[in-house]
Image: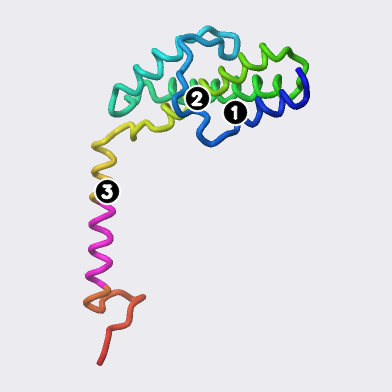
Amino acid sequence: MQEYERKQLLERIGKEGATIGARIPEEITVQGERVELRDFVFEIKRRTTVPEGEKERVEQAKRNLRKERIERLDRIEAGEISMAEGERLAESIIGIDRALEGLQQLGPANLEAEARAQEVADKKRWSRFMRQALGLDEDSTPNRR
């Protein structure tokens, strides 16, 4: 691979919109293990939240995908591959990025817990506001006109 070809591939991978329209690879070898990546991502994304039991599985998959992405990028950066191999690696990196985006956009694991936490936070803000408005808060001084 020529230096300018290597730079073009790296630019393509680093482009902000590189994953727009990109497909998640059907299968990919990640850290030496074959993974049906597209099915995995779509299975997880179909759910509104990640169940507590699968949360660690998803986090591990994201870590493995990030490691694999770095290894593939390093191979391109080294430039000791053919242009065809570089193209294949670039496409797979963009596919990995697309899969990571899909996995990053998952909602919180427990909507009920999130709703309760939000309600508690709202009550605390309201209570603090009322204490300040009534001049009962040590940090506030009553407004006098």
* Kind of residue at disc 3: Gln
Residue at point 30% right, 21% down?
46
The part of the image, by quadrant, that contains residue 67 is: top right
Comparing marks 3 and 2, which lies closer to the viewer? 2
Q: Residues within 10 Å of mark 3 (few under 14, many from 20)?
A: few
Of residues 12 and 55, the one nearer the viewer is 12
CA gap, disc 1 and disc 2: 18 Å
Q: Give the percent coordinates (x, y) of residue 114.
A: 28, 41
Mark 1 and mark 3 lie on one chain; the one further toward the N terminus is: 1
Which residue is labeled 3 in the image? 118
Q: How many neighbours does mark 2 have within 10 angstroms: few (below 14), some (14-19), or many (20 or more)?
A: some
Q: Quadrant of residue 73?
A: top right
Residue at position x 25%, y 71% in the image: 131
Q: Earlier in the sequence, mark 3 or mark 2?
A: 2
Residue 28, position in %: x, y? 53, 11
Res 38 quadrant in image: top left
Q: Is residue 133 above or below residue 21?
A: below
Is 43 a magenta residue? Answer: no
In this view, the residue in front, 44 or 19, is 19
Identity of the residue drawn at 76% across and 20% down: 79
Question: Where's the C terminus, which quadrant?
Answer: bottom left
Measured in 3D between alpha carbons, the distance from the residue under mark 3 to the one under mark 2, in whole angstroms, is 27 Å
Tag 2 residue: 62
- Residue where numbered disc 1 is placed: 13
Looking at the image, residue 12 sits to the left or right of residue 6; the answer is left
Q: Which residues are magenta?
A: 120-131
